[in-house]
Every structure is written in C-alpha cells, then in structure tokens.
Amino acid sequence: MAERILISGITGFAGSHLAELALKKNCIVYGLKRWNLSRLRNVHHMMDKIIWIDCDITDYVGVKKALEIAKPDKIFHLAAESFVSVSWNHPSHYMDVNYKGTVNFLEAIKELKINPRLLIPGSGEEYGEVFEEELPINEKTILRPVNPYAVTKIAQDLIGYVYFRSYGLNVVRVRTFNHEGPRRDNVFGIPWYAYQIARIEEGLQEPVIKTGHTGDRRNFTHINDIVKAYWIAIEKCNPGELYLIGSDENEKIYSYKEIIEMLLKLSHVKGIKIEQDPKYIRPTAVPRLIGDTSKFRNLTNWKPEIPIDKILEDTLDYWRYFVKNKLY
C-alpha cells in the first residue's frame, strides 16, 4: 500500500523538491497551502498530482482537520518563516509560525491519538555565535542564537523533544546547514547574487552586485541532496535524538565572497563589480557555520553527491530563466 505523506511548506523551496521525491516514490502526497496566500509557482508542474488541503498552520483547528483528512504515515513539517533579516522586524510573527505552528501539529497528533513519524527540520543558524576553536559544530555545541529567527527554531526543536519525552511522539529532530539550488527565494545570499547577475546579463541592472556580509563561511549542499537526507532521516533516525545534516568536507566550505567570484566566472558579462550595501548588512552576523554531520552519516550512509559548481550553475540558470521571461 502506498505511503501517505503530508508536507507543510510544500509550495516553498525545500517542500516542492521533497514533493517531487515523494511522487517519484509513488507515495500519496498531501500538501498544505493557504487558500489565498501561498505562491504556487514552485509546484505548478505537479498541481494535479498532489492532494491539496487549505490550511494555515497557526490555526489549530485547521491543522487538526488536515491530519484527519490526510491520515499520514509521515509528516514533513517544512513550513516556516525562514528569512533571517526580516525576523528582527517581526519576531512575534516568526514565533507564531515557527513555534506555535509546530505546537499545533504536536497537539493535534496527541489529541487524535495517532503517531506518524514527524520530521522537524531545524537550522544551523540556531548555533549563532560559534568560536573558531568550537568548529566543526556538532550536536553538543552550545547554542548562542544572535537573531530572532534562530530563537524560534530552537523553540520549535525543543518543543518537539518535549512531546517526544512526555507523550512518546515519533519526533525526528534535525538541524540542516545551508542548502541551495533552484526555487530558493532571491532574498537569500546565493539566489540574490544569481538574480542580480541574471539582470545584468539582460541589461536590466548596472554591472554591480550589491551585497551584505561576504566574509561569512558556510557549508553548502544542493537541495536535492538535502531532501534525500530528509527522507532517509524520517525512516532511519531515532525519534527524540538530534542529527546534523549538510556538507562537512573541507572542500565544501566557502565564504560568500568566494561564492560570488565563482558565480561571476559563470557569467558571460565580464567586469562585474562587487559593492557592499549597508541596507543588506544584518545587526549581527554569523561568521562561521561549519558542521560535523558524522553522526547522521554513520547511521544512514547518506552523503551529498552534487558539487558546488552544479549548485551554482543550477541556481544561476533558474534565475536567468525567470529574468529572461519576465517572471520575477
């Protein structure tokens, strides 16, 4: 019998790629969307293959009804407010969506007396201020969040652990480091740079890329590798335990400045300049997010397969298409 999969955040970056993977596995896929707010461009090619449920995750009644309809074997709870820079302006809203939305799922599962496996993906941002001698980050590294988004993700993760300990819910906890690729919004670093290059190539922008912090160092993993990791995690990871997911090889650690230089080499326009703009600089930066994902890898044998060059090519080609066809 086909597995019943419920994905919150299915219209977003990771959610849409995960839906493609689930459909390839011949699962019955239920997707949550807000009836008048969700953008559907990421899922337009599979609209008729997904069973849609109108639901705002901040509404407990709606979440409970969605679970009653879907009767899921597995829930991938990917819906979240995730743009760090905006979180300073809307900290309460971020808490409503990221924390309260998660509580609604946990409470509904408990009240309905069902126990599907529930994946709650956290973020490397939760670690915040990490000192050089603490690298690479592992599951025991101290959390020192430096932005409201990170605080809400910590709260989300820990309430999941509470429901595991208190009620025996099958909560799978992961923290994911930077994942990139097509469909990621252009408010984030790499898509923002790629979007500007695409505009420059079309003559819509002067040959100058505006940036914020470019010295921050990160692990970067292709989104297709990440959703495969999510699928393996929900099947193989022990409920209640924490696992880090992402690239951790030395050759996959780059500063944003290095990333921009690599993107510029892919452009057919030469002489593009890089210029830091104060409006893109966050109140506090996270200069180092480099993870040790050996616990997850040793358990599952997962490892990322797509190199950084392909991540950048896919992202740039995606934004070239959007800009050329005036879709954004």
Image: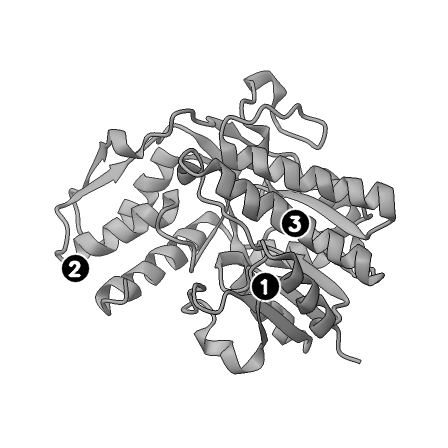
Left or right placement of residue 80 versus residue 45 in this view: right
Q: Earlier in the sequence, mark 2 or mark 3?
A: 3
- Whole-percent x and y of residue 279? 27, 33
Q: Are marks 3 and 1 in contact (CB under 8 Å)?
A: no
Q: Nearer the viewer, mark 2 or mark 3?
A: 3
Q: Write down the residue under mark 2.
A: 202
The quarter of the displayed image where residue 297 is located = top right
Residue 1 rendering spot, x and y as whole percentages: 80, 80
Amino acid, disc 3: Thr
The residue closer to the viewer here, 213 or 104, is 104
The amino acid at mark 1 is Leu
Q: CA distance from mark 2 to mark 3?
A: 42 Å
Number of residue marks: 3
Residue at 31% x, 59% y: name it: 319
Relative to residue 130, is residue 183 drawn left or right? left
Residue 285 quadrant? top left
- The answer to whether one can see residue 245 in this image is no
User: Badge 3 is on which residue?
Assistant: 102
Q: Position of residue 307 (x, y in %)?
A: 50, 51
Figure quadrant of the C terminus: bottom left
The tag earlier along the polypeptide, 3 or 1, is 1
Residue at image position (43%, 63%) is 37
Answer yes or no: is residue 130 visible.
yes
Judge the density around disc 3: few (<14), some (14-19), many (≥20) Cα neighbours within 10 Å.
many
* CB contact under 8 Å: marks 1 and 2: no
For residue 69, which quarter of the picture? bottom right
Circle 1 SS class: helix
